[in-house]
Amino acid sequence: MVTKSGSRFGCVSLIILLVGFGLGAVAPLLLEKHSRKEADKGRLDGSPPIRPVFLREAQGCPATSNEAADLDSKMLEVGRSLAASDPTGQSPANSYVVSYFAWHWRISGARRCPPPDQIVQQLAPLLDRYKWPLANTELNDLRLAERLPPSASRAEGLATIGFLRWIPPSALKGDDSRPYARQLLAEQGRFALPWREAAFREISGETRLGTSAAYLAVATDPVGALPKVQRTMADMLRRSRARYTQAFRTGGEIQAIKNDDANRLIELGYALARGGAAAEPYSQPIVEMLDEVIARAAPPFGLMATKPTELCRIAKHIGGQVARAANSKDFCANGFKGGDGAPLPY
């Protein structure tokens, strides 16, 4: 005969068994979800900053050979033919024309100058026909937008990428292209204005989406955005100091700003610099950042302390007192050689 206490014990045991089984089944799913989330965060925030065009130095290059120039012209003709036959822009051949003029010309032969502007800009009306860039445009292919004139369709395409709520599809499954798309959208002039308020709402110092929103906000509304970006950078610097790490330099270790924190601070510096001379009254965080050091990975030696030389470039662009602060630093002389080499000079 089964007693009431025995029955209750059996029920409790069954419940415990079922809960244990459920947890055993759910745990791998939760672990997988966590791993996927961490991987997505790495794709978004693990990449170095992309230096804006206005801060890049002109690079010398050898004269383009006749063979290379001929290839440029032929690829333009291919693009024209494809625009007429494939208005969707979805064909692999069409994508290759974009890739060629964006970056593939670099590996198409001997070292050479990039295709000339008069060739590249003839692509603009062709690409506008199918509203390039498309949502699945690879990050490297987006470089082409730097050399094309602003347009409404280009702004729409870049905004579609930049404000997706998930990482855009990518054949290479590489870096998250949304921050770069926002940076490119900022250079679309009046065509970027419809996304001014969305950018202002998303300003943050913790992620590349937040810092690229700051860049776009300053480009579209410097008067309204510069004070908020200043506060954001000052707050980010304060939090970065609270989580210093140890980095090696000659003579021992020193406290330094973590790699990812430094990248976000540099990107906020880009946002301020986008305002030009108008950013000078809001540049105190840049002045303070010049006194910091950055921890950068230097395998196999671990973390090395480096100087924030990218802030020199930013400060000198803004001018005024922040430029004078940069000029007082030895590491800002000699063309910013050495120091922080993280930003990508596309």
Image (tube, rainbow, N blue to C red):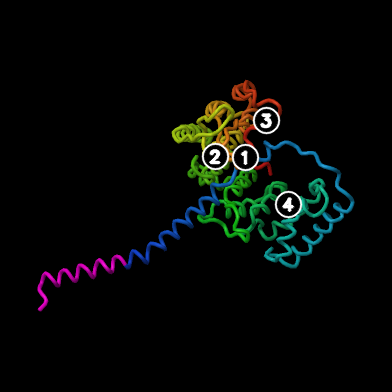
Query: Is 283 placed left or right of 1 in the picture?
Result: right
Bounds of the magenta span?
1-20
Residue at label 3? 336
x%, y% of residue 161? Answer: 58, 54
Q: Nearer the viewer, mark 2 or mark 4?
A: 2
Residue at coordinates 40% horizontally, 60% vertically from top-left? Answer: 30
Q: CA distance from mark 4 to mark 3?
A: 26 Å
Q: CA distance from mark 4 to mark 1?
A: 20 Å
Q: Amino acid at mark 2?
A: Asn
Which of the two labelled residues, at mark 4 and mark 3, occupies the earlier sequence position? Answer: 4
Residue at label 4? 103
- Residue 180 drawn above or below residue 336: below
Q: CA distance from mark 2 to mark 4?
A: 28 Å
Judged from this view, the residue extending furthest toward the right is 66
- Residue 336 drawn above or below residue 95: above
x%, y% of residue 176? Answer: 57, 52
Q: Which image quarter: residue 340?
A: top right
Q: Amino acid at mark 3?
A: Phe
